[in-house]
Image: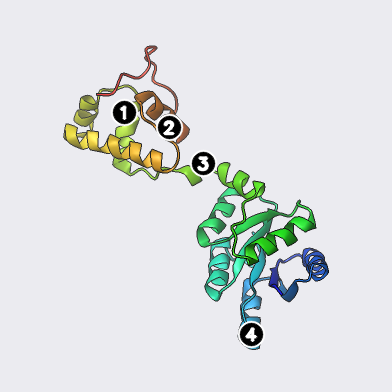
């Protein structure tokens, strides 16, 4: 039988999940308002960790989703985030910390039970709420450019020849060219390829590196 822990600071939510888990044959071993309570219970009971912890994205005790997920995963449980899924940055944090997936609080209770079963089997939880929240967060696809790479991209994508970019920044032409190559590689790695100078202009605008297109009506010059 799957051992489940429910952590949510809304008692009504926990009671509903407890009843649904009981009907589905899941063993709710803990139900409480924060992660510390759960870990204290674990230490006191000396029992096995829950197979799956259903965790609210934001608790009222001042903890962050990152620390909560990490503590639970470190303790040996898989974590499902149960949330309204309207905070993409926090959802992204949960994923980075090791959460198995997310289920919206607006979903039917059967979806939550199905998610528990999926995660308990060790399978990935791929659902619309998770994908939408991550896709909606621009930072998730951030190419993580260095300050120098951003400077080179800003000038180059605005239409300046690479030699001029190098002169303006006081670096060798080979250095500027290497920076543009690394910028392209980084955008490919996050699924936002930019093989041409026009593509680089689009990426620079998307990421706020350039506020608007170059004013030259001919558009960006070709690669050089």
Residue 203 got which mark?
2
Residue marked by disc 1: 155
Q: CA distance from mark 4 to mark 2?
A: 51 Å
Q: Nearer the viewer, mark 1 or mark 3?
A: 3
Q: CA distance from mark 3 to mark 2?
A: 12 Å
Q: Residue at x 19, y 29 (%)?
A: 167
Q: How many marks?
A: 4
Cβ atoms under marks 1 and 4 closer than 8 Å: no
Between disc 3 and disc 4, whose residue precedes? 4
Residue 7 got which mark?
none
Whether residue 99 is visible to the viewer of this picture, yes or no, is yes
Residue marked by disc 4: 47
Cβ atoms under marks 4 and 2 closer than 8 Å: no
Between disc 4 and disc 2, whose residue precedes? 4
Residue marked by disc 3: 138
**In this picture, residue 72 sits left or right of residue 206:** right
Label 2 crowding class (10 Å Cα cut-off): few <14, some 14-19, many 20+?
many
SS at mark 1 in the image? helix
Q: CA distance from mark 2 to mark 1?
A: 13 Å
Between disc 1 and disc 3, whose residue precedes? 3
Query: The N terminus appears in which quarter of the rendering?
Result: bottom right
State whether residue 121 is above or below residue 171: below
Q: Nearer the viewer, mark 1 or mark 4?
A: 4
Q: How is the image coloured?
A: rainbow
Depth check, front residue: 189 or 35: 189
Q: Nearer the viewer, mark 3 or mark 4?
A: 4
């Amino acid at each position: 039988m799957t051992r489940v822990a429910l952590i949510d600071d809304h008692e009504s939510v926990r009671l509903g999940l407890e009843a649904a888990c009981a009907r589905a044959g899941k063993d709710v071993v803990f139900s409480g308002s924060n992660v510390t309570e759960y870990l204290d219970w674990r230490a006191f009971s000396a029992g096995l960790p829950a197979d799956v912890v259903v965790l609210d994205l934001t608790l009222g005790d001042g903890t962050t989703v990152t620390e909560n997920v990490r503590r639970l995963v470190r303790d040996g449980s898989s974590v499902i985030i149960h949330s309204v899924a309207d905070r993409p940055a926090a959802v992204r944090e949960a994923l980075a910390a090791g959460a198995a997936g997310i289920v919206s609080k607006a979903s039917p209770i059967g979806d939550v039970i199905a998610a528990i079963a999926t995660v308990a089997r060790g399978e990935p939880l791929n659902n619309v709420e998770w994908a939408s929240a991550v896709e909606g967060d621009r930072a998730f696809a951030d190419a993580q450019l260095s300050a120098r790479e951003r400077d080179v991209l800003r000038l180059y994508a605005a239409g300046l020849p690479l030699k001029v970019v190098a002169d303006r920044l006081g670096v060798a032409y080979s250095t500027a060219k290497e920076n543009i190559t690394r910028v392209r590689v980084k955008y490919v790695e996050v699924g936002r390829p930019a093989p041409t100078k026009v593509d680089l202009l689009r990426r620079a605008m998307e990421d706020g590196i350039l506020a608007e297109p170059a004013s030259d009506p001919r558009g960006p010059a070709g690669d050089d």
